[in-house]
Each structure stands twice: as C-alpha cells, then as structure tokens.
Amino acid sequence: MNALPDSDIATVYVLAQDLAENDTLCAQLTDAGLRARGLTSAAAFLASERSVGPACLVLDADLGAPSGGLLLQDALIDLQDPIPVVLITDRADVTTSVRGMKAGAVDYLTKPMPEGVLLSAVGAALALDRQRLGRERASTDVIERAQRLSQREREVMALVAAGRMNKHIADELGISEVTVKIHRGNAMRKMEARSFADLVIMAHKLGMTSPALYHGGIGRNRRELA
C-alpha cells in the first residue's frame, strides 16, 4: 500500500512541561495512528519547524506557570497562527476555561483524561484544520485558474458578476453578443465552473465585483475586434 503524502498526514503537537506526561500523551496519540511531537516549552514550539498537513496543539494551560499556556495561545492569535488548540489542565478553573474557550480553544480538558476524551477532542481539532486547509487549497486553485484568463475574458467575467446581461456587456465592451458568449464560455471552461452561479461565486471570491478592476479599455460603443 502506498504511503500517504505528507500533506495528508495529521500531526498533533503536545506541549506539556512534565516529560513523563508528555511521553504518555504522545504514546496515546501514536497508538491511535496519529503523528505526535512532544515539546516542553512555548519557545521550543514557536521555533519548531511545522509539518505540512493538518495539525493541532494539545497545550497545558499552566505551561511553566499558572495560565502560561494561555499566554502562548494569545501569542498564536497575535501571530495569526491558525493551529487549533486543545487545552488541558490539572484544575477545573472556570475563569481559565472561559478565557481559553473565548480565545478559540476547541476543548478544555481536565486531567486525568480518559483516552477516548482526548482523542475525541483532537479529532475535532484536526477536522477543523482540514477544513481550513481545504478552503485555502480551493482559494489557491481559483486564483491559478483565473491566471489562465485573457484580459477580455476577465472583463466579461467581471461584468457578468456585476449582473450585466449579454447585450449590455456587448455594448459596454464594443463587441458583439456572440463574442460575449464565446468569452463567457471560455471563462467558464478555464475557471472549471460547473454553472453560471459557480462562475459568479468565483468572481466574488477573486474580488471581481467591479468591472472597473478589469478596465482594460472598457468603453461604451467603442467597437473593436474580439
């Protein structure tokens, strides 16, 4: 059986100061078929090279000091690091749990944790990261497809997204309706749009909501070749 590409392998980073606890958590995750990497300090995590593919962070809320893990969580937000966080703690502290959840933690678990509870929380966190990566890949694909378009196809796509009818687009660009239909069809083919609505959605994702963004000589009644 072929191995999965690195981009499809999930990685769980475990950040707990106690080495024995770190090893135990990593072993549980590895036994469940996940790739686990144990670290013992916020600095080590921030300096580490991330694996590609979906990931999450199991973080001790009291790393190094009371609420030390929450400070790392705040730092990740400041860095716009999207990695989902599962917080773990020795104490059921309402204030700490509320703060962690408000900062976006996927779950807040109190030790000792049944193995199934940890795996469930990690599974939810990895699912969120897979969704994020899927959205990013989709956006990248749309951008790459848009680069295939000619200037005229971009203009037609922008005008279509702005709600113009074919005859109005033809008048705006100074070309025939037949030529508009050809460019619109080419745009749909190159963008791999399954429907007219799909093409419009892509145009909005690309910011092509105003024909002025793709001016390229747009001018009413300016007759020219396609």
Image: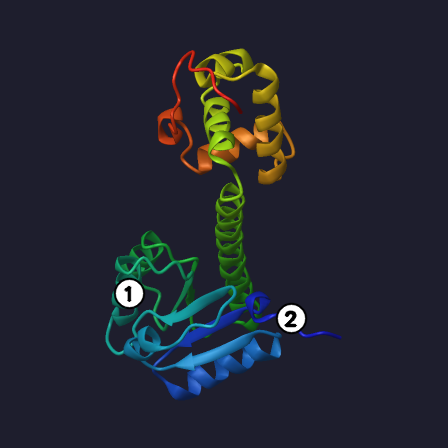
For the point 53% across and 72% down, which residue is it? 114
Packing grade of label 2 (10 A; few <14, some 14-19, many >=20) is few
Q: Residue furthest right?
A: 1
Would residue 14 be found to the left or right of residue 195 on screen?
A: left
Q: Which residue is mark 1?
A: 70
User: Foreground residue, 190 or 61?
Assistant: 190
Would residue 158 be found to the left or right of residue 33 on screen?
A: left
Q: Give the x, y percent position of residue 226.
A: 53, 25
Q: Which residue is mark 2?
A: 4
- The quadrant in which residue 18 appears is bottom left
For the point 27% across and 61% down, which residue is it? 74
Asked which secondary structure carries label 1, the reply is helix
For the point 63% across and 29% down, which residue is it? 195
Q: Give the x, y percent position of residue 21.
A: 43, 83
**Residue 187: mark in rendering:** none
Q: How many marks?
A: 2
Q: Quadrant of the image for the N terminus?
A: bottom right
Q: Nearer the observer, disc 2 or disc 1? A: 2
Q: Is residue 140 above or below residue 169?
A: below
Q: Is residue 206 above or below residue 209?
A: below
Asked which secondary structure carries label 2, the reply is loop
